[in-house]
Amino acid sequence: MSTRKTAVAGQFYPADYKEIKEMFAHFNEVLDKSITDKSLLNISPRAVIVPHAGYVYSGFTANVAFRLLKNSASKHVVVIGPSHRVYLNNASVLEYDNFETPLGPIPIDKKLADTLIDRFNLHFQPDAHHEHSTEVQMPFIKTYLDNPSVVEIVYGEENPNNLAEIIDFLLQDPEITVVISTDLSHYYDIQKANTLDSICLDAVGRLDISRLHQGCEACGIIGVEAMIIAAKKRGLKPILLDYRTSADASGDKSKVVGYMSAAFI
């Protein structure tokens, strides 16, 4: 059986499963103590937007969204993220049997992967799948869902409308959850980052594509735009869950990276 081996374990997140479990437990302890609207913890999302930096920086923000998957009917998770390493024309769908994580392997839904490739004229480019924007999401999925299967989609030069059609198709099945991976602005001072990132958050909160293009600098902006298009078509409501920057972990406010998470219900 073919396995997509971990590429960034020990770098972006711990390679040891005990360390991952301890991090997630800490994130949840902080969340339970700090959240003011407890009803947010009962949300059952059809899709989420999450960040993809190292867990030390963005893990809490991602965990807020992934924890909500426990409330959903999800059995299959499609993770969609931008390519950071290789050039891609449109999108590549992973066609291995399993996705390795420190918490154990996750089976890949090959039937769904093949359906997406055939229906939307996609392809499988192996070197595109040593990608951290998607890999860092897998331990969360393994933790919060019982016996899930996954599909990994990595995109490059892609039209958001094409990606939106894929998301819309996936959301026809109530047992499929879509995960959109993106970080926000990169390496501005904290004030500039907050200004730019507020545009991204406002656009998602209002499902406003025109607003998205007024200064949002998300590295996964194609995926975010596609999600907005699909959410509007499906009548999904966006709920902003968390926003922070790397400065919250590092204390360095001179060059920060922004992170957000959101749920669509």
Image (tube, rainbow, N blue to C red):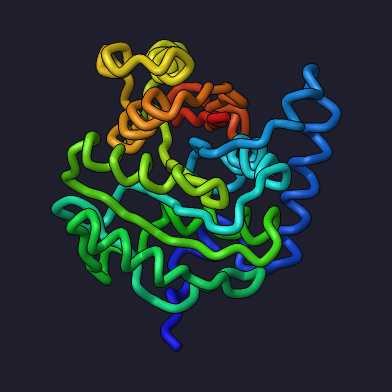
138 in relation to 216, above or below: below
Using the image as rendered, state which of residue 56 and residue 108 is in the foreground. Answer: 108
80 in relation to 121, above or below: above
> Is residue 256 visible to us here?
no
Q: Which residue lies at the image location 22% right of the left edge and 54% below the top edge?
A: 120
Using the image as rendered, state which of residue 252 and residue 20 is in the foreground. Answer: 20
Query: Percent from the top left, x then y, of residue 95?
Result: 34, 72
Q: Quadrant of residue 58?
A: top right
112 in relation to 39, above or below: below
Q: Quadrant of residue 196?
A: top left
> On the picture, is 15 further left or further right than 12?
right
Q: Which residue lies at the image location 40% right of the left edge and 64% below the top edge?
A: 112
Query: Percent from the top left, x then y, of residue 6?
Result: 48, 70
Using the image as rendered, state which of residue 131 and residue 121 is in the foreground. Answer: 121
Q: Which residue lies at the image location 47% right of the left edge and 63% below the top edge?
A: 8
> On the picture, is 215 further left or further right than 196?
left
